[in-house]
Amino acid sequence: MRPGRLMGGAIWSAAGRFFEFAVGLAAVALIARWVGPAAYGVFALSYVVVGLVEILVSDGPGDALAQRRELRGGHCNATLAGALAAALAAWAVIAVGAGGIARWLGGGEALAEILPLRAATLPLAALAVVPAALLLREQRLKALAGAGATAGALASLVGIGAAWWGAGLWSLVAMELARHLVRTVLVLRLARWRPGVRASRRDAVDLLGYNASTWGAFGLAYANVQLPRLLIASALGTEALGLYALAERVYDQVFSVLMAPMYQVLMPGIARVQADREAARQLAASMMRVAASVASPLYLGLAAVAGLLVPLVFGQAWAAAVPIVQLMMLLGLRSSMSIVQLSVVRGMGRPNWHLGANAVALALTVVLVNAALPYGLLAVTAAIVVRSVLMWLPYAWFVRQLTGLTAWQQGRAVSGPAFAALGMAAVTAGYVAWLGTSIPAAAALAAAVLLGMTVYYSLLPLFAPDAAAFARSVIGMLVRRDVDSVRRLFASG
């Protein structure tokens, strides 16, 4: 499978996610102004419970269906039956035990009140798992992206409307419910799949091995995300958690626009060529260069302008989140490589390696975050960044074993765009510091973004000539409105 064809699919997915990101960010910005850091921190705690169950009912089973070489109807039926049963059972347990769960997490009465309705997203996620996996498997990414964008837009309208009418914390719950409901309805319609009753024990057993490793791997990854939240809430309070959760939300939103589409197309693509080691190697190297060329400047650019961006978008009440956002954006340097590494590991059928790596990462999280807690929220965020950097080593080794792409080659694939982005970030940050408050924040932000784009475009030929030539080709075609040439470029890449 050619890298250009994969990039064509990734562009559709990224376009839909970018629209979802823009609308969602606007909604979160407005709601965050109205509810404040403490309430936002309470809502963040709801993910500790609900998000863990979503791994069981949707994330893991969906990945298993997309990765299989041969897929039978029984596989889909068995997946839906198991996911829906688990979702309904978990919803009931969360609703009944909401008070105890809230006390254990330290979220108070507010968390206890929202948990029963917040967990109503679980059966909706279970209903969507099979049709979404089928769309992904068939590389109908335009349809999948459209469903996500529509769901995100409607959910944002619901959230903003509820917050406007004074719903407070409940507006965030309403937004999540609306997003899941609309997406589920749309993917069911788009996939044109109807569940059946035929499913054998063999169908379930076929998926069990991959699912078991996936559940373990995703569960440990989830613990890596939620453990710092729990520790922050316990030691530093829900307001500190709100600041951290907002910074993490900004990072995750950018990740969902850039890196999640890459995984959606690359993991199935690697799975299709898993018998051809050389093809997998070339595919991984190409996609690393492409991902780094886009991700590095965007993440580091956000870090450079965070001092202007956060107060302008979220309000002065969130100014304390600025250094947290800046540190969190450093994870972007690693994300362009890690998403390709993860796609290779899972696409080549090694979810057990992913499981083992996440166990190591969780151990590092426990040690590093506990050591950082006495020094405050900024130190905790730095510990998360350090953990991510350390985890490059096992994943680089995995990719070498599976494709022959050495750690040095992996580093070279992303280093050029990263150095160009670092230069851009330094210039932009200096410019922002020089401007200070001499001009309005919106004008200063626009000027900083324009400067950053110009500097990066100028530095990229020095550090990554191939990536710069590719970017110039695409920009030239877009300026000429030569859409057909753009399509041919990606189709022949």
Image: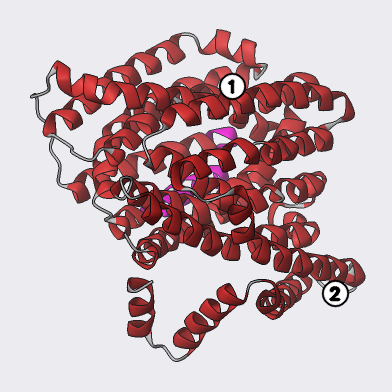
| Residue 37 x %, y % | 72, 37
Residue highlighted by disc 2: 439
Q: Quadrant of the C terminus?
A: bottom left
Label 1 crowd (10 A; few <14 / some 14-19 / many >=20): many
Q: Amino acid at mark 2?
A: Ile
Describe the element under mark 2 as helix, strand or loop. loop
Q: Position of residue 373 (x, y in %)?
A: 82, 25
Residue at screen point 51% across, 43% down: 399
Q: Gap in Å between the C-alphas at discs 1 and 2?
A: 42 Å
Against 176, residue 228 (above or below) is: above
Residue 25 at what x, y percent from top left?
57, 53
Q: Is residue 125 left or right of residue 330?
A: left
For numbered disc 1, what is the local secondary structure? Answer: helix
Of residue 19 and residue 56, the one placed in the foreground of this image is 56
Q: Is residue 86 left or right of residue 407?
A: left
Q: Main secondary structure of the magenta part?
A: helix
User: Of all residues shown, which one is farthest toward the bottom?
Assistant: 480
Total numbered labels placed on residues in the image: 2
Which quadrant: the N terminus? bottom left
Which quadrant of the view contains residue 120? top left
Question: Circle 1 sits on which residue?
Answer: 111
Residue 202 seen in the figure? yes
Q: Nearer the viewer, residue 219 or 267?
A: 267
Query: Does the magenta portion include 158?
Result: yes
The stretch in magenta equals 149-170
Q: Earlier in the sequence, mark 1 or mark 2?
A: 1
